[in-house]
Image: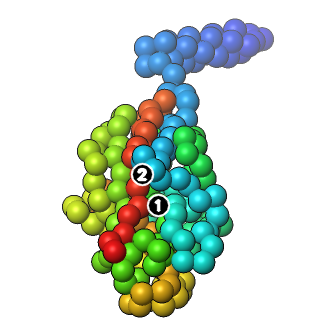
Amino acid sequence: MISKLPWVAAATIIVVVVGLGAWALLGQAPAGAATITAAAGQGVVFAGDIPAGNASGIENVYIIEHGTYTDTDNLSGHANILGVIEADLGSVDIAYETLFDIVVAVKAGSENMAYVRIDNMNVGLAITGSFAYSDENAGDSALSHMAAFSHDNSGYDTTSGWLRINAVWDNNGNGYTLPANGSIDIENIRLWGWK
């Protein structure tokens, strides 16, 4: 009786050799997360929390999965947040090739604007790295817009109060991605109002 063992061993060796050859020719899957770093503009600081009273400040920069949130909601604790930057020069790592948006959450108060309303304030930033945008104010192009929180303001359209908004950069509704080991720096983040 002839054993089938030599044929099985030969077939196994062939499969292993073909697999190793394909791996050597095609290479490994890319490794490494994508990194996003944020820096406040001159004279602007991260508030570290929601600013008290009628004060203004940047609350957080959210990196959130594209298409999974409502832009008028408070995103704190949202299930689809990929990372939160809470301080100047903070950074987060996200999985590469993940579709994401950049949301700058701010509170703007009457100490920085004549009348508390969304058209009397603005948020801006610049992006460098794996993709780039020169300084841009939210809403100046199709790449971004501002959305007032649907539930969180006081004294809207008066001379004493505040409102919270999300300034959303979503690449004209298409989201952004970064390659493996890719990175962007969100620079010169700023908030201002008109008095």
Percent from the top left, x then y, of residue 53?
Answer: 60, 78
Would residue 127 appear left or right of 84 to someone viewing this image?
left
Q: Which residue is mark 2?
A: 189
Pointers 1 and 2 in contact (C-beta within 8 Å): yes
Q: Which residue is mark 1?
A: 104
Q: Foreground residue, 137 or 14?
A: 137
22 over 155 or under it: above or below: above
Task: Please identify the quarter of the rendering in which residue 138 is found.
Answer: bottom left
SS for callout 1? strand
Would residue 3 appear left or right of 105 to someone viewing this image?
right
58 over 22 or under it: above or below: below
Mark closest to the chain's N terminus, 1 or 2: 1
Q: Nearer the viewer, mark 1 or mark 2?
A: 2
Q: Amino acid at mark 2?
A: Ile
Q: What residue is rendered at 64% in x and 16% in y?
A: 12
Q: Residues within 10 Å of mark 2 (few under 14, many from 20)?
A: many
Percent from the top left, x then y, of residue 140?
Answer: 23, 63
Q: Foreground residue, 85 or 162?
A: 162
